[in-house]
Image: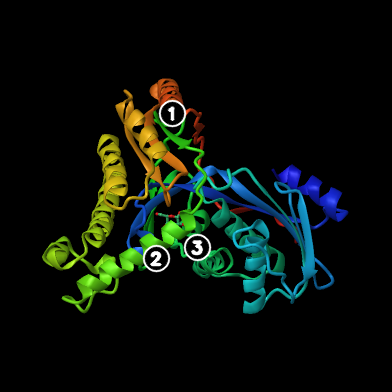
Amino acid sequence: MVRRGLTSFEEILGSADHVTVVRAPGRVNLIGDHTDYNDGFVLPMTIDRSACVSARARRDEEVVLYSTHFREKIRYPLHDMPISEAGSWTSYVGGVIEELRRAGGITSGVDMIVDGDIPLGAGLSSSAALNVAVAHALDVVFGLELDPIETVRLCRAVEHRYAGLECGIMDPFVSRFGRAGSALLLDCRSFEYEHIPFSPFSDSAAHLSLAIVDSRVTRELATSRYGVRHAECLQAAAAVREAHPSVESLRDVTPEMLSACRSDMDDRLYRRARHVLDENARVLNAADALRDGAFDRFGALMNGSHASLRDLFEVSCPELDTLVSAAQRTEGVLGARMTGGGFGGCTVNLVRTPAVGEFEATLRKAYLTAHGRSPRLYVVSRNDRTETLIDGRD
Ligand code: GLA
């Protein structure tokens, strides 16, 4: 990808002198979904697919952006970002540039090429990785010395303002802070985090593999449904707050408090809250299981998470359920669940390495029979981190 970035720079922007190249990885969430925007816990890890950004400051005040994926180029004055379609690649890239310009520090125009190999719209955080990569590239090119936590907040703000998705902090956080050979336990309230060693790759001593299965269900309406769930969580917290004024979010609600409020609460809100409380507990138990190397226990928690997302939080779909139940019935699969926002996207599976072939064959067959199509399977080979691959100032 580095070579591709430099070649594209030469072809599209004349020369590749003094170009900075960075990458930021996508992620898969191992456990802890729909907890981040409730100030809860998550346990994601980065994957071996990244957004890659090549950039160089210009002498004038023009911004020139090119996407190798969309083969589109746009050009605009730094102080006059055009309005682009919410959630388009230009809205993300332009959004990060605009936010950093407003914060000060970006003093001239920039040439930038964005590239990457994270499947788009599959729920592997291609947009968060793109935002983090753009911010990191600008940090290097303009010597901004950005605080990494502030960078993550800015990337989330771009998702809110320029893509209209009221997402939580998980995706940009893990893309920016994730580290090779580990999962990231994150407290989304305090932003305290811990790297927990975990290498479910082909050379792993535990002979485990992490398989991501893309249902290829397009996540139309996913943004609006995500917003509905977010609002329901706020309403559930407000309902408990009537009896417990100190409750700020579902993070502050204990199982006892929730049970006591149940009869006064809409059952739908109760189920949403129940999922969030249980899921937070599962994340902490899963982190313990990883520390203990208790992978069977970890897998059982993944299975429990899927059932809760399906039945209580209602963000799964028939295709994801087919993939998960076929996986759970396969010998050698320790755990399987949908991952990310839901309503389509991917499942994540912890599989004993010798069983991966059988796992793939079983899933293909089950999916074809039930839904008449094939899923796409990725076995994660390593997990990457956000890094500078070439510093153009050298
Ligand atoms: C999406 C959002 C995240 C998180 C997950 C669900 O990926 O971007 O912030 O809320 O859904 O866990």
Question: What's the coloring here?
Answer: rainbow
Do the CB atoms of the residues marked 2 and 3 lie less than 8 Å apart?
no
* Residue that label 3 marks: 165
- Which amino acid does the dot numbered 2 rest on? Phe
Q: Is residue 385 left or right of residue 347?
A: right
Q: Is residue 84 left or right of residue 322?
A: right
- What distance separates the C-alpha of mark 2 from that of mark 1? 39 Å
* Residue that label 1 marks: 367
Image x and y of residue 75, in percent: 79, 64
Tell me the SS state at disc 3: loop
Q: Earlier in the sequence, mark 2 or mark 1?
A: 2
* Residue that label 2 marks: 191
Tell me the SS state at disc 1: helix
Specify the quadrant that holds the C terminus. bottom right
Neighbour tally class for label 3: few under 14, some 14-19, many 20 plus, Cα within 10 Å: some
Q: Is residue 371 above or below residue 231?
A: above
Image x and y of residue 317, in percent: 39, 43
Could you say which quadrant of the image residue 319 lies in?
top left
- Which amino acid does the dot numbered 1 rest on? Tyr
Whether disc 3's CB lies below 8 Å from ligand 1 is answered yes
- Which amino acid does the dot numbered 3 rest on? Leu
- Which residue is at the far right? 14
